[in-house]
Image (cartoon, helix red, strand yellow):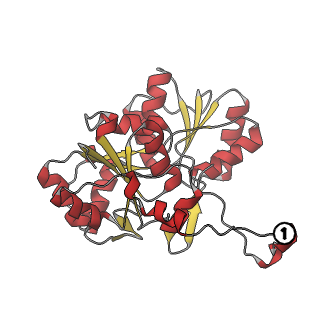
Amino acid sequence: MKYKGLLIDMDGVIYRENQLLPRAEEFIRYLIESGTPFVFVTNNSAPTPEDLVIKMKHLGVPGLAPRHFYTSAMNTADFLAEMHPGCTAFVLGESGLSAALQEVGIPNDTLRPSYVVVGEGSPSSERITKAHELIESGARLVATNPDNWCPVKGNQTRPGAGALAAYLESSTGQRAYYLGKPNPYMFFRARRRLHSSTREVMMVGDTMETDIRGAIEVGMQACLVLTGSTQLVDLANYVYQPTCVMEGVAELLEELKTGGNTDRMSSPALAIQNESHERSGDRHQTDRRVFARSRPRPAMTK
């Protein structure tokens, strides 16, 4: 792979359940010492960049600055400020979202906002009802990301911004506009921070639906690491494929150090797809043991 900058997801790539993944600290230290431009991109709208600097320091990764982080809250604020200068917003979210909107001059408005903006958090029923009323009165609905759920630890998850936005879509009949990954605007704005062209940037992520899809659709290179939500056997389910697949950032670190070169044709996914030509699925409709199956988790994104 030939690239001049990296966009890097965090949860599932650098850490998991607040534990650094193997050689993650060494990987980031190498990027800093070698002068490789990089930005961490996350769909989590709750923290500020300053919060993330402190979190990474506690996890054992010092030397980072707020400029190294770009969140879906910041992406939403950039989008609204560019599309609708002078707009106002009613916020359902945490401090990271409110701070991002204030940073670009979008004030909080509880009376007649231009937008209801939904992010991560657990708003009260009163605020959800207020958001519903404001949307019915003319405010438009925007979500920081489309994630219906987010991992917490093990198999435990929490509701995401997409779930709350979907609730308000159902109650008001208005469709939300979703920022964050995989929206191309997230990749466009994050890439600008690297001062590199699109083809010169590689996205490193663990989720096909957000990280890899968004990168491929805007023309970036995309490296899937198998330390997060997507496993190797899952790749056969997707039409789009990553540029390369690696076990984790430890493997990517070795490639950076040695100047190795991989491309899409070396993806193990292609080998898996060609291993067997046996017909998959049930032969007959009556073969489905619907009642014997546990309830599947819904898709992470819409």
Position of residue 107 in the picture relative to residue 114 (left or right): left
**Nearer to the camera, 98 or 29:** 29
Given the current orientation, which residue lies at the most extreme left position? 33
Q: Tell me if residue 154 comes above or below residue 191 in the rendering.
A: below
Q: Position of residue 35 (x, y in %)?
A: 14, 48
Q: Quadrant of residue 20?
A: bottom left
Given the current orientation, which residue lies at the most extreme front position? 277
Query: Is disc 1 placed on a helix, strand or loop?
Result: loop
Given the current orientation, which residue lies at the most extreme top position? 85
Q: Tell me if residue 208 comes above or below residue 248 in the rendering.
A: above
Identify the residue at image location x=47%, y=44%. Answer: 214
Q: Quadrant of residue 165?
A: top right
**Nearer to the camera, 250 or 83:** 250
Identify the residue at image location x=45%, y=34%. Answer: 185
Position of residue 87 in the picture relative to residue 170 (left or right): left
**Residue 126 can be seen, yes or no:** yes
Amino acid type at mark 1: His
Q: Tell me if residue 23 comes above or below residue 56 in the rendering.
A: below
Q: Residues within 10 Å of mark 1 (few under 14, many from 20)?
A: few
Position of residue 46 in the picture relative to residue 33 (left or right): right
Position of residue 163 in the picture relative to residue 2 (left or right): right
Judging by the rendered image, the residue that carries numbered circle 1 is 284
Q: Tell me if residue 12 comes above or below residue 85 in the rendering.
A: below
Q: Position of residue 77 (x, y in %)?
A: 44, 34
Identify the residue at image location x=44%, y=26%. Answer: 81
Q: Position of residue 151 (x, y in %)?
A: 51, 65
Q: Position of residue 259 (x, y in %)?
A: 18, 55
Given the current orientation, which residue lies at the most extreme right position? 286
**Nearer to the camera, 44 or 14:** 14
